[in-house]
Amino acid sequence: MFADLPRWPEMEDFPYDLGARAASAHQHKGMSTMKRSPVYLAIAFAAAAMAGLASMGRADDAIAAEDDMKIRIIIDGVELNGTLDDTPAGREFATLLPLELTLSDYHNTEKVADLPKRLSTEGMPDGMDPDVGDITYFAPWGNLALFYRDFGYSRGLIRLGRIDGSIDPLTRSGKLSARIEQVGEAD
């Protein structure tokens, strides 16, 4: 079955050609000798699979980029750009926009604010380990949390999206006035 596959030129001197004796007599019109090396076949299949996955990843990334929702967070007049995830929680949060919030500091790690209603957590992970810049929802308290410092895994924390770029305004002390809106909404 695989004996009719053409050889890759760089495989000519491959030292682990275990099937060389069995296939060396096989000739095909205009092609070099075919060999059915298990190692050769494994490498060929791995390369084909990786090429297929790579192209699928690019297509998935393009689709995800189209589906993600761009937002703007305005904190005391300074604009931060963000992207909401295309998840049930991210989409539900988007339905609440625009929002006018007062952000309070929580443990010198995140800015938090109560949301006007609780978001559904159905189908979402039980928790997460947030990164700096993550836009999250803490289900047990029903509040929004914007992380400006690293923090460990928290049960009940759900990622809604991410701030794209600087998070400097979040590091200010005290309460902060914030408006969160979809890009294009107030333009």
Image: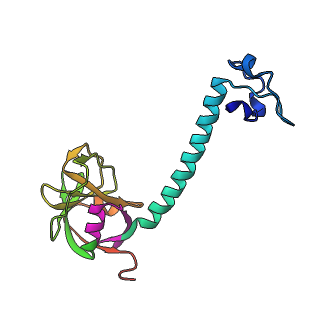
> Could you tell me which residue is drawn at 81 percent across and 21 percent down?
25
Residue 17 image point, x, y percent = 70, 20
Quarter containing the N terminus: top right
User: Is 70 placed left or right of 176 in the picture?
Assistant: right
Colour setup of the view: rainbow
Q: Is residue 183 above or below residue 18?
A: below
* Viewer-proximal residue among 73 and 172: 73
* Viewer-proximal residue among 27 and 168: 27
Please tell me whether residue 78 belongs to the stretch shown in magenta. yes
* Viewer-proximal residue among 142 and 3: 3
Camera sees residue 104? no
User: Is 168 placed left or right of 125 in the picture?
Assistant: right
Q: Quadrant of residue 166?
A: bottom left
Quarter containing the C terminus: bottom left
Q: Is residue 18 above or below residue 78?
A: above
Residue 132 image point, x, y percent = 33, 52
Q: Quadrant of residue 4?
A: top right
Residue 122 image point, x, y percent = 21, 57
Camera sees residue 124? yes
> Could you tell me which residue is drawn at 18 percent across and 50 percent down?
156
> Could you tell me which residue is drawn at 24 percent across and 73 percent down?
96
- Part of the protein shown in magenta: 72-94
Q: Residue furthest bottom?
A: 187
Q: Is residue 29 above or below residue 138?
A: above
> Could you tell me which residue is drawn at 35 percent across and 82 percent down?
186
Residue 180 image point, x, y percent = 29, 72
